[in-house]
């Protein structure tokens, strides 16, 4: 099973780019990261730092569960292509879900049409990083913009001290909006918009 499966917008021109290059490369990177249990835990501690080594609250077990799901191909999120208007100009957003709506990543199809493969993979890794945080911390939000930090670490991008400090000081919940999405259930879903 694919880590990201296209839902709404699967017939758009942006979907061809995603299925041709972006998603296979993204999945290969996540498979590579999940190959080593120790490296996976080290990455998750760097990004999601439970402060206690992960022992007291089951952090390590949840991190390993995610790793095992990725390695087995059973970790899955829905990816929907949305307009820039629907995402209020954001490149992508992670929606934790509402009853009957489900967890998903929303990608700005207008932005995606002109974005590079590397930019698309980084944006999607950032939102996957938010999904990992949701599972690891059971709804509590890790300090800073953990999605951005996860994407940078997962891609091996260098972060100088000033950049790392800025990421850790961001409040990635400060631009929370309620948006009416045209889903099959027509539910209201709370979105965290990643304005870049």
Image: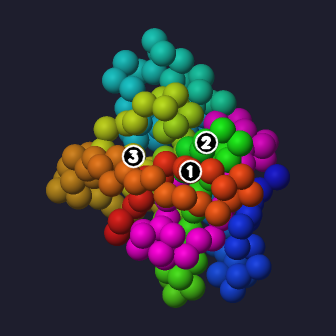
| Residue 146, label in figure | 3
- Nearest to viewer (mark 3 / mark 1): 1
The range drawn in magenta is 66-94
Local crowd at mark 3 within 10 Å, few (<14), some, or many (≥20)?
Answer: many
Please give the residue where the numbered disc 2 appears in the rendered image: 98
In this rendered view, identify the residue nearer to me: 58 or 81: 81
Residue assigned mark 1 = 188
Residue at 69%, 86% in the rendered image? 13
Q: Cα distance, mark 3 to mark 1?
A: 25 Å
Residue under the point 31% across and 38% down: 143
Q: x, y (%) of residue 68?
A: 71, 36
Compared across the picture, whether 179 is left or right of 50 comes to right
Q: Is residue 157 magenta?
A: no
Cα distance between the residues tagged 2 and 1:
8 Å
Residue 82 placement (x, y as % from top left): 59, 71
Q: Report, in whole angstroms, how far the alpha carbon at label 2 lies from the one at label 3.
A: 22 Å
């Amino acid at each position: 099973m694919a880590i990201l499966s296209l839902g709404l917008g699967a017939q758009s021109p942006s979907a061809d780019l995603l299925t041709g290059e972006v998603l296979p490369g993204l999945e290969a990177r996540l498979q590579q990261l999940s190959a080593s249990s120790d490296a996976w835990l080290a990455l998750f501690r760097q990004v999601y730092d439970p402060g206690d080594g992960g022992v007291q609250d089951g952090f390590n077990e949840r991190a390993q569960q995610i790793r095992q799901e990725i390695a087995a191909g059973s970790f899955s999120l829905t990816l929907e292509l949305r307009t820039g208007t629907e995402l209020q100009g954001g490149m992508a957003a992670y929606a934790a879900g509402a009853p009957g709506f489900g967890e998903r990543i929303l990608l700005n199809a207008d932005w995606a049409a002109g974005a590079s493969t590397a930019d698309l993979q980084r944006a999607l890794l950032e939102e996957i990083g938010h999904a990992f945080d949701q599972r690891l911390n059971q709804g509590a939000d890790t300090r800073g913009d953990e999605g951005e930090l996860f994407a940078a670490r997962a891609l091996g991008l260098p972060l100088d001290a000033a950049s790392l400090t800025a990421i850790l000081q961001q409040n990635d919940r400060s631009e929370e909006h309620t948006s009416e999405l045209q889903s099959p259930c027509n539910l209201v879903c709370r979105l965290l918009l990643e304005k870049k």
